[in-house]
Image (tube, grey):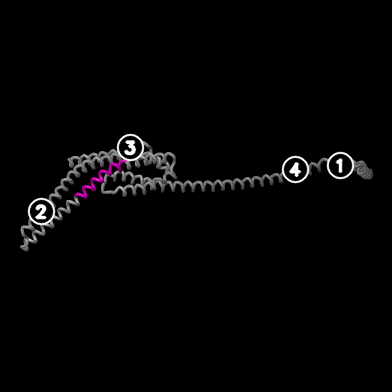
Amino acid sequence: MNIEDVEKLSTIFGIFGFGAVVGGGILFYFLKSYIPAYLSKKGQNLATKQDIGAITDQVEAVKTGYAQILEEVKVSNQLKMSAIEREQSLKKEVYMEAVEAISQSQIMVANFSNLNITGHAITSEFSVQAGKIAKVQIVGTKETVEALIIFMGEVNTACLHLMLERAELVTRMKTIETLETLRNNHQSEIERYVSIMKDMNLAGKLDKGTMDYINRSVEFESNRSDEHVAKIDELSDVQKKEHLLYVKECMDTFFRISRCLPKVILSIRKELGLDISDEEYMYIFNLHINKGEIVFENFLSKLQTEIV
């Protein structure tokens, strides 16, 4: 309020007298004290509402952002779970094939004792199974891969050794088969000469010269057949004994290799979440493999008795 405003108020208060002066003073005090406080409070209320609005907006923004983060985490977790499920599914498929192939590889070791199965057939089967087993190196853990490599190393070493030991038996077997074929041919010739002799005798055409020729021929064929029979018997005796020893070696190798298998199986079960205690598994495994060894030993003893 400036000087001119004061002069105007003094003039007005002079017109209305002392009462007006007092009233004016009260009014002036009211205007000076209450109005600014009211306006200040009003401003504060307005500011408070504005602050609440801003805070609300911020809270909503945080909630929205948090919801987005939760959704991203959810999607990420779903992707991770899907990836884990796919990985487990792939592992299960690979391991099921691999375990079956491992079983076939063990059988292949035992099949070496069957000399009627060609070496080519055995090695071809091994190549097929080895391809399935090799896939484990892609999906397996370090523990599984190491156990499998050790197992397959034993199988490979055994196969090479058994293949070499088998060669002599196969050669002898083929020699016996060749001698049997020759013996059968001589027997057929003897039967043919006897048949000719009967026919000529019935026809009354059998003279002494023809009879002597037929007799010499039959004698020659008989001597050759007897030589082959003697050689067959000699080789067969050796073959039976050597083959029996080889069968035992094959089965001993089979059981030895089988005892390397639990580490592979236990590691695979662990990866697939099919846990079983080592003690429980080994108890079951040893129970059956020991029983198998006893059954085979009894069977082998029976064969040895029959050969002797």
Other-residue count near label 1 (Cα within 10 Å), few / some / many at <14 / 14–19 / ≥20: few
Foreground disc of the pair 2, 1 = 2
Residue that numbered label 2 is attached to: 216
Q: Which residues are magenta?
A: 161-179
- Residue 96 visible to the viewer: no
Foreground disc of the pair 3, 2 = 2
Which amino acid is tagged 1? Phe
Which numbered disc covers residue 218?
none
Residue at 60 percent across and 45 percent down: it is 66
Mark earlier in primary sequence (3, 1): 1
Q: Secondary structure at mark 2?
A: helix
Residue that numbered label 1 is attached to: 28
Mark earlier in primary sequence (2, 1): 1
Compute the Cα span from label 3 to label 4: 83 Å
Q: Secondary structure at mark 4?
A: helix
Horizontal placement of 178 versus 42: left or right?
A: left
Q: Residue furthest front?
A: 209
Mark earlier in primary sequence (2, 4): 4
Q: Circles 3 and 1: CB distance less than 8 Å?
A: no
Compute the Cα span from label 4 to label 1: 24 Å
Which amino acid is tagged 3? Tyr
Horizontal placement of 70 versus 116: left or right?
A: right
Mark earlier in primary sequence (3, 2): 2
Which amino acid is tagged 2? Arg
Compute the Cα span from label 3 to label 1: 107 Å
Residue that numbered label 3 is attached to: 283
Q: Secondary structure at mark 3?
A: helix
What is the x, y in percent for residue 122?
31, 47
Compute the Cα span from label 2 to label 4: 144 Å
Mark earlier in primary sequence (3, 4): 4
Q: Looking at the magenta stretch, what is its main secondary structure?
A: helix
Residue that numbered label 4 is attached to: 44
